[in-house]
Image: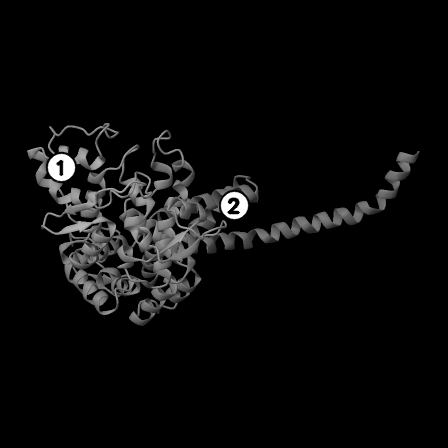
């Protein structure tokens, strides 16, 4: 009786509950067309441009077809959304190529994507989309203004990781670089922070329009407590990263003193003046060596007892077939021998005095830095510009780009080598704003 009484007490609620359920189902059914409209609007953003009438009609038609096959709304919606994510306009950045040989301006929508993927490695934000919709992005004044805005945005961190770290050959350092656990047990704990340092350094340089010469000559670093201890730098405590100044006197400053660079260009258990020297030669100065002869003997993974890494390399480089190349790259590596294979300053004083191929005598990181900044500044800046231009255009730099590179060099020298000057010169160039015709073999 008590159970029946309780059930009877609920009975008066049955009608209102059923009515609310019917109303809710009607509301859901009424919302379905709006949700399909929202899906089509999302496709506009996913395709980085407005959909054509045909594309919008095809998406709506796919949804209707799925519903006619008795699929519920949620499943039909998910399958239609999946179609957006596997479509060519989403997966590829497509641009309309004019016929013939003549170049033509890209559309404002295409320009918005070029700018956004250059500086943010991502699709355009709402401000860029609004300017593209109004066809006002392509003006030189607006392009320069948007580039400056985007460089101050936190999303420029992606330019630091995608451009700078790829150029410096440390991309994926935290996952891909291994060291001997027996010799360097602390490396596994520190390698993510080692990689974070250059990312934060370049993000700071980009957002604050720093000089590209700071890549070599900075007297500051962005450090965590653990990394500061690794560098034997006092006064850094707590979990947050912070800017530390006056570090050149501590053997740091710029990329030459970063643990990620020094560790990547080393072996698992020892340093490698050859790798470090070749990195300076190719990555920073843009020069190239021929491939070594097949008969060149392999160097041991560890330094034999009684020798230093430098002495091991000098013996190897004395072979006549090897000497021609090694005299060009080894001295750069010898200048960095004050650092071990994970970027620490060595406890014992190390001979870092070396003679370059041009006869100049340098000593240690300070001597190498001064040489690069004074004797090889043009080569370094040119290499930076070449790498940045190639990254921005998504292709190899070509002979036809040489005038633009020269313009970048001149404008940088006249404007304190500020990074924003290089970016503005690129985005206002014809290479960035135009697209070549279908019959032009050189491409973009």
Q: SS at mark 2?
A: helix
Q: Hey, which residue is sitting farthest left in the picture? A: 320
Q: Nearer the viewer, mark 1 or mark 2?
A: 1
In the image, residue 430 lies at what x, y percent? 22, 63
In the image, residue 341 lies at what x, y percent? 30, 38
The residue indicated by pointer 1 is 291
Q: Residue at x 51, y 54 (%)?
A: 38
Tag of residue 258: none
Quadrant for the C terminus, please. bottom left
Instruction: Give the mark nearest the N terminus, 1 or 2.
Output: 2
Q: Could you classify mark 1 by the number of other residues whose Cα lies within 10 Å: few (under 14), some (14-19), or many (20 or more)?
A: few
The residue indicated by pointer 2 is 77
Q: Quadrant of residue 45?
A: bottom left
Q: Could you classify mark 2 by the number of other residues whose Cα lies within 10 Å: few (under 14), some (14-19), or many (20 or more)?
A: many
Of 388 and 401, which appears nearest the observer? 388
Note whether 251 is above or below 109 in the view shown. above
């Amino acid at each position: 009786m008590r159970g029946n009484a309780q059930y009877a007490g609920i009975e008066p609620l049955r009608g209102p509950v059923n009515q609310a359920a019917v109303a809710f189902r009607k509301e859901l059914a009424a919302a379905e067309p709006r949700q399909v409209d929202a899906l089509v609007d999302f496709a506009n953003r996913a395709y980085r441009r407005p959909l054509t009438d045909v594309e919008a009609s095809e998406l709506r038609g796919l949804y209707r077809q799925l519903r006619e096959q008795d699929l519920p709304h949620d499943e039909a919606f998910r399958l239609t959304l999946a179609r957006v994510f596997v479509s060519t306009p989403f997966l590829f950045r497509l641009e309309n190529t004019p016929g013939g040989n003549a170049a033509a301006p890209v559309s404002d929508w295409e320009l918005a994507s070029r700018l956004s993927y250059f500086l943010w490695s991502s699709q355009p934000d709402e401000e860029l989309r609004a300017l593209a919709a109004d066809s006002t992005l392509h003006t030189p004044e607006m392009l320069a203004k948007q580039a400056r805005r985007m460089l101050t945005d936190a999303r420029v961190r992606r330019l630091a990781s995608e451009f700078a770290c790829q150029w410096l050959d440390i991309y994926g350092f935290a996952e891909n670089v291994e060291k001997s656990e027996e010799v360097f047990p602390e490396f596994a704990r520190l390698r993510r922070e080692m990689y974070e340092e250059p990312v934060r350094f370049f993000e700071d340089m980009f957002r604050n329009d720093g000089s590209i010469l700071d890549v070599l000559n900075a007297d500051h670093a962005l450090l965590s407590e653990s990394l500061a201890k690794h560098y034997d730098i006092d006064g850094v405590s707590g979990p947050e990263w912070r800017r530390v100044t006056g570090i050149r006197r501590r053997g740091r400053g710029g990329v030459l003193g970063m643990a990620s660079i020094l560790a990547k260009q080393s072996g698992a258990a020892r340093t490698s003046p050859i790798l470090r020297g070749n990195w300076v030669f190719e990555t920073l100065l843009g020069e190239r060596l021929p491939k070594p002869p097949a008969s060149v003997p392999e160097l041991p993974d560890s330094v034999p007892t009684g020798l230093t890494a430098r002495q091991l390399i000098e013996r190897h480089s004395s072979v006549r077939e090897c000497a021609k190349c090694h005299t060009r790259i080894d001295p750069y590596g010898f200048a960095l021998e004050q650092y071990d294979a994970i970027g620490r300053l060595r406890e014992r004083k190390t001979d870092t005095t070396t003679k370059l191929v041009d006869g100049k005598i340098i000593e240690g990181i300070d001597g190498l830095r001064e040489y690069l900044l004074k004797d090889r500044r043009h080569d370094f800046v040119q290499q930076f510009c070449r790498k940045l231009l190639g990254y921005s255009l998504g292709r190899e730099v070509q002979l036809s780009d040489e005038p633009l590179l020269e313009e970048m060099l001149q404008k940088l020298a006249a404007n304190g080598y500020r990074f924003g000057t290089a970016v503005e010169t690129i985005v206002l160039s014809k290479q960035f704003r135009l697209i070549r015709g279908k019959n032009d073999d050189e491409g973009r």
